[in-house]
Image (cartoon, rainbow, N blue to C red):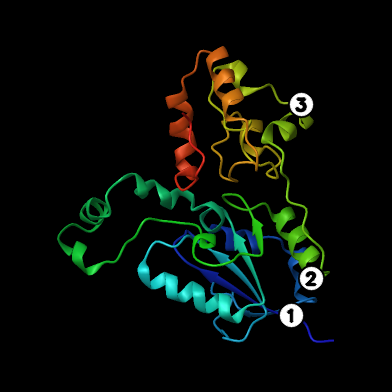
Amino acid sequence: MTKPRVAFFSFSSCEGCQLVVLTIEEQLLELVNLIDIVSFREAMSEKSEDYDIAFVEGSITRTSEIESIKKIRDTAGIIIALGACATIGGVNCLKNQFEMEKVQDIVYGKMASNYDTIPARPIESVIKVDYWIHGCPIDKDEFIEVTKAILLGKKPRIPDYPVCVECQMRENVCLFEKGLVCMGPVTRAGCKAICPTYNDGCTGCRGLIDDPNLSSHKNLLNEHGLTVDEAISQYMLFGGNSKEKYE
């Protein structure tokens, strides 16, 4: 039986999600028995233009990247967006709050004209994506679960309930009770509520659930003496590309 040929690609990102893949150790060895990794810059020098499945990390932030991601789409039978930058645009979308000329000037100064930059966007804004692995960085257990499901021809189980559910499962004290801002009520679970568990408010790196109750979240903020502006500042760290807005 021929094993699926798998390639990993990077666009604008820190490549931290690919590093997570390399930390799954024994499970990675088991996975390698099921697939043939033909391109993975973080792990090997060899590369191939012939692949069946592509894991793509990073957001699209340059015009030249549009052509590159389309080429990957034309080649791969299955494309998986890997991590927050690829799935929702990630922290790169912070620059979308400014005019691109201003961004170029701030970052590159006198050399600005030599560098191409466009508003950051998730890869789904350019091509069709088949599956998503959310987070910044991704959760290694979810990576294994999603990958195995795809190899078995099954639909991966991606949570569509809020982080609050996982917080309750871990018996965490709600951060709102501590006067902190948290995006958990509207953010997709699957991270094991790792940030709230360590007393750090969720900043929405896994993106919004499909039907977020934003008005209820605003009411929750008001109940605890917090402002919508505080929530927006948290949300914009990862959600700058989202169509959902507080009003």
Q: Residues within 10 Å of mark 3 (few under 14, many from 20)?
A: few
Q: Position of residue 135 (x, y in %)?
A: 60, 49
Mark carried by residue 151: 2
Residue at the image point whose x is 80% and y is 77% from the top: 33
Q: Position of residue 143 (x, y in %)?
A: 71, 59
Q: CA distance from mark 3 to mark 1?
A: 41 Å
Give the amino acid at mark 2. Answer: Leu
Q: CA distance from mark 3 to mark 2?
A: 34 Å
Local secondary structure at mark 2: helix
Give the amino acid at mark 1. Answer: Pro
Q: Position of residue 3 (x, y in %)?
A: 77, 82
Residue with the mark numbered 1: 4
Residue with the mark numbered 3: 171
Q: Is residue 238 visible?
A: yes
Q: Nearer the viewer, mark 3 or mark 2?
A: 2
Q: Position of residue 211 (x, y in %)?
A: 65, 38
Vertical arrangement, residue 82 with respect to residue 210, above or below? below
Q: Earlier in the sequence, mark 3 or mark 1?
A: 1
CB within 8 Å, label 1 to label 2: yes
Q: The N terminus lies in which quarter of the figure?
A: bottom right
Between residue 119 and residue 197, name the one nearer to us: 119
Residue at the image point whose x is 60% and y is 60% from the top: 82
Q: Residues within 10 Å of mark 1 (few under 14, many from 20)?
A: some
Q: Is residue 22 visible?
A: no
Vertical arrangement, residue 118 with respect to residue 241, above or below? below
